[in-house]
Amino acid sequence: MNDYGMSGDDLEQMYQEVILEAAKNPHGKEHFATDLTKETAGDGNASGETVVRATHEYCTPGESHQFNPTCGDEATVHVEVSDEEPYTIRRVVWDGQGCSISQASLSVMVDLVDGQTVDKAMELEHTFHKLMESRGKGLDDEAAEESLGDGVVFQGVSKYPMRIKCALLAWEGLKDSIAKALAAKNA
């Protein structure tokens, strides 16, 4: 990975700042998921509120709830995939709570895949997984690293096996949501 003439400590600090900023001001976060902490056994909605979702015309939605039992991070990822080929992600939003790593990963993932083809989004998901498997070494492919944009800051996270799941929560939700949207098209 390009070190931009910075020491390892300086890079680590810059990465931490990017992650904290993305977690503090997340992109694509909307409040649409059911609050499971307030759900009652009887009616499924303790507040009596109705959740209304607008979708894009000519799109098929898919949604996935992900939970990391290790630390309690959870997110619901909602995608809308175009009905025409090449299938394109017309909208991706999420709702959830968790540590700064999971929240920042969700935000960065939205920035990277919104408007991309499904094939490109899955390529980015695969590249991000490879980054998480690098154990802090990064990727040998500079073009692959560049394709991750701000996602490359999670290289430092990949040094810590217990935090890798936090970073991957977003991408697992994306992959599952897209699969559900594509399955609904073929149903």
Image (cartoon, rainbow, N blue to C red):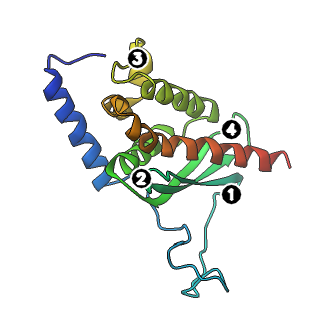
Residue 34, x across and y down, in percent: 56, 71
Residue 94, x across and y down, in percent: 50, 56
What is the number of the mark on residue 87? 4
Q: Marks 1 and 2, how far apart in space?
A: 37 Å
Residue for point 13% across, 28% down: 10
- Amino acid tagged 3: Leu
* N-term-proximal mark, 3 vs 4: 4
What is the number of the mark on residue 57? 1
Give the answer, above or below, for where 1 lies relative to 155.
above
Mark 1 crowdedness (10 Å alpha carbons): few <14, some 14-19, many ≥20? few
Question: Is there a contact, CB below 8 Å, between mark 3 and mark 1?
Answer: no
Q: Marks 2 and 4, how far apart in space?
A: 34 Å
What is the number of the mark on residue 139? 3
* Quarter of the figure with residue 6: top left
Residue for point 63% across, 40% down: 88
- Amino acid tagged 1: Glu
Label 1: element kind: loop
* Quarter of the figure with residue 24: bottom left
Q: Which residue is mark 2?
A: 71
Q: Is residue 67 left or right of residue 142?
A: right
Residue for point 61% across, 68% down: 53
